[in-house]
Amino acid sequence: MLVVNPSAGKSAVGPRMIEIIDVFIKGGYDVETVVSQSVEHLKETVTGRGGDFDVVVCCGGDGTLNLTCGALLGIDGASRPKFGYIPTGTTNDFAKTRGISSDPVKAAKQIVEGEEHKIDVGFFGDKTYVYVAAFGVFSDVSYATSRSLKKAIGHAAYVIGGIKAVAHIESFHVKFTVNGETIEDDFIYGMLSNTRRVGGFKLPLFKKFDLDDGLIDITLVKKPKGIKRRSRLVNALIKQKSDGMELLQFTTDSLSYECDKEIPWTLDGEFGGAYKSNDIKIVGGLVTMVY
């Protein structure tokens, strides 16, 4: 099953769709193409019929990846097909981290000729995320940046959006509970990641970084004190370096949080809802990807 999001990278994949299908046919597959009409249509199609296929391949951006992976989890483990990804979005953080080609035809060949990989899946309350959940400054840049601007200038759109975000920094007084211990402070940003890149930026990696170790890599940024610290935050964004900002970094397989006001979250670059509290965990090896 080849699931295509017509809104993500239309110019990149449209003219090459016949080539992509040809790769799968030559690889021994019968191919059924599904053009996603809506979020509900994608979920219903993948969950309802995905179990009849050997591989479900999604063609789109990181949001399409998230939706397809979540829909696959609705299929019983014994019937759950393997999962393939052809990235055609703006930043494609997950694909770049995993070494999946940005060329749609080459990505299709990787699925046909590649190896199987058991990947971790994060659970944010009753929702799922594949590679990142985040809140605070910069976290809304992806979904708040218009699609037309993304298509026109690509990654630069995210930088522009990030700089604008600094003008209205909001902090959240959050209490995180991790392994029975609490971390409480005013934070302007929090990221729960399983990736080497977010929003097109390379992340400073943990010393023992592993994509599929059943652990979440946590980064929390405390509220900067004073205008100079805010200025350094802008410089950190432009330089793509932490620049000595106050960071807390640790790993865990689960945590929970509480806040006195709703915190808007992004899940894999799309708006994931706003919550005063939630439970978060990661489960290893839930989905088998081929690349």
Image (cartoon, rainbow, N blue to C red):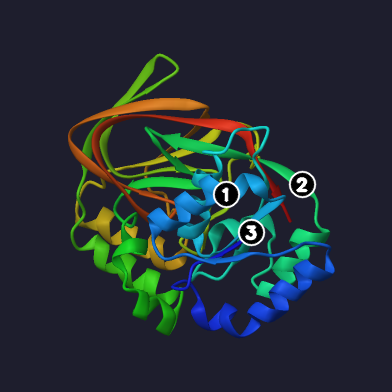
Question: Does 33 appear above or below 73?
Answer: below
User: Between 217 and 124, which is closer to the camera in this rendering?
Assistant: 124
From mark 3 to mark 2, how far is it between C-alphas? 17 Å
- Residue 69 visible in image: no
Residue 30 pos. (x, y %):
75, 63
Q: Which residue is mark 3?
A: 1
**Three-letter amino acid code of the residue under disc 2:** Glu
- The residue carrying mark 1 is 49
Q: Is residue 76 above or below residue 227?
A: above
Quarter-of-image position of residue 14: bottom right
- Badge 1 vs badge 3, beta-carbon distance below 8 Å: yes
Number of residues whose C-alpha sits closer than 10 Å to that of mark 1, classed few (under 14), some (14–19) or many (20 or more): some
* Number of residues whose C-alpha sits closer than 10 Å to that of mark 3, classed few (under 14), some (14–19) or many (20 or more): many
| Element type at mark 3 | loop
- Residue 23: quarter of image: bottom right
Look at 26% across and 56% down and name the residue there: 230
User: Which residue type carries mark 1?
Assistant: Arg
Residue indicated by mark 2: 116
Q: Nearer the viewer, residue 129 or 167?
A: 129
- The disc, 1 or 3, on the residue closer to the chain's N-terminal end is 3
Residue drawn 35% across the image and 79% down it: 149
Q: Is residue 160 at all visible to an observer of this figure? A: yes
The answer to whether residue 71 is above or below residue 37 is above
